[in-house]
């Protein structure tokens, strides 16, 4: 029996030693993936980098991040589905990209619904922002850092200043409700990602476009345009593009990790406002330096666009989206 006892003792020790190698330390870092459509030169990518670094420090290293810019992991509009399913952890995500499945989110890219980035950033503490956050969380994503961007109007052949100027133009409108408004105003519409604008302008597929100030610069659209209606003072185009997290990821975090994410997210909103306004100023300087004819929209011009928006996009949203009229009232 002694050999059997000896064998049993040795086997027990080996199992215990092997078990030590199988134990996963509780302090092991967890890597989260952040995907977005913007280039590494884009301020939105830099904001995501800043967020990742700050959360890593605040969580004492229990959370780390890997970033995938320029649609390297998921295409721009596929990111919502990926987050809803838990296949993606975070994104810098234009909320209106999910409006095909969450129609209420078209309010976050509504022509002339706000007239400044500051007004958009104030949504977090208003009922309209709370409604949007609740809708997002119910449908699988959580807003961490609010970010709004203003957009300009670029064109060839003629300047686009007021609604009458869009007649006969081949436009990329950036958003279903902008497409509807501009089409009603007499433009022909072609939908595409902002990353495709340069080639479309170069080949004549487009001769006018709407996109964010940051994208006008990062995609070097000044090389293909003759006129630029800068959003530095007023813009008809404002879009919510917050840092968002998959609700599945959110629910899997510890309370300490959730606290770190929320605190960093709130802290970065002042930086988000700063970079959004910087983008408008930089776009004006870059386009002016490139010899593009730059126009700053006036309040009177903006009011003419708002009249068109109310008759077209606002009316359509109120009629087609459940609770749309109430959201419009809250947003106004």
Image (cartoon, rainbow, N blue to C red):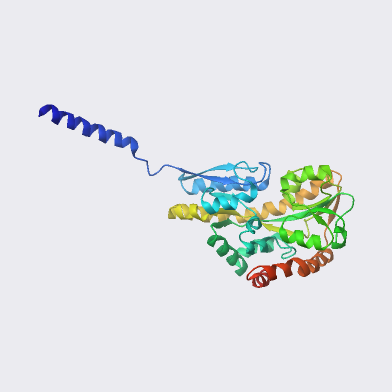
Residue 45 found in image quarter = top right
| Whole-percent x, y for residue 90 in the image | 56, 50
**Where 222 falls versus 84 (above or below)?**
above
Q: Position of residue 141 (x, y in %)?
A: 55, 56
Q: Is 110 left or right of 160, judged from the image as shown?
A: left
Rendered location of residue 132, percent (x, y): 60, 64
Residue at 76% x, 48% y is 216
Q: 28 and 314: which one is in front?
A: 314
Q: Residue 324 appears in which quarter of the rendering?
A: bottom right
Quarter occupied by the C terminus: bottom right
Residue 213 visible (yes or no) = yes
Query: Where does the image place residue 85, in percent across and percent down from the top left?
Result: 52, 52
Q: Nearest the camera: 142 or 64?
A: 142
Which sits in the foreground, 82 or 235?
Answer: 82
At a point 78% along the width and 43% down the height, the residue shown is 198
Left or right, 68 with respect to 181, comes to: left
Residue 247 left/right relative to 197: left
Residue in the image at 68% along x and 45% along y: 42
| Number of marks in the rendered image | 0
For the N terminus, the quadrant is top left
Report if residue 264 is visible in the image.
no
Residue at the right extreme? 157
Outermost left residue = 1
């Amino acid at each position: 029996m002694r050999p059997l006892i000896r064998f049993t003792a040795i086997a027990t020790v080996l199992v215990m030693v092997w078990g030590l190698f199988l134990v996963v330390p509780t302090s092991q870092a967890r890597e989260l993936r952040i995907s977005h459509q913007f280039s590494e030169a884009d301020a939105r990518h830099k904001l995501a980098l800043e967020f990742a670094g700050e959360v890593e420090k605040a969580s004492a290293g229990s959370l780390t991040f890997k970033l995938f810019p320029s649609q390297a992991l998921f295409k721009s509009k596929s990111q919502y589905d990926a987050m809803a399913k838990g296949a993606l952890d975070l994104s810098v995500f234009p909320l209106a990209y999910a409006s095909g499945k969450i129609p209420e989110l078209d309010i976050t890219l509504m022509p002339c619904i706000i007239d400044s980035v500051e007004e958009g950033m104030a949504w977090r503490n208003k009922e309209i922002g709370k409604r949007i956050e609740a809708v997002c969380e119910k449908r699988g994503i959580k807003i961490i850092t609010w970010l709004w961007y203003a957009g300009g109007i670029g064109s060839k052949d003629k300047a686009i200043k007021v609604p009458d100027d869009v007649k006969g133009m081949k436009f990329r409108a950036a958003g279903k409700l902008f497409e509807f408004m501009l089409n009603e105003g007499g433009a022909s519409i072609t939908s595409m990602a902002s990353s495709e604008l340069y080639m479309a302008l170069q080949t004549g597929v487009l001769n006018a476009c709407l996109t964010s100030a940051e994208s006008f610069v990062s995609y070097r659209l000044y090389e293909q345009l003759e006129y630029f209606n800068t959003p530095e003072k007023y813009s008809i185009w404002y879009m919510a593009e917050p840092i968002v997290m998959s609700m599945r990821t959110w629910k899997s975090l510890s309370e300490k990790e959730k606290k770190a994410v929320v605190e960093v997210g709130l802290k970065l909103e002042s930086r988000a406002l700063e970079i959004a306004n910087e983008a408008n100023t930089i776009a004006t300087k870059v386009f002016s330096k490139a010899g593009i004819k730059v126009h700053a929209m006036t309040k009177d011009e903006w009011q003419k666009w708002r009249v068109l928006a109310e008759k077209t996009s606002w009316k359509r949203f109120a009629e087609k989206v459940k609770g749309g009229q109430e959201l419009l009232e809250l947003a106004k």
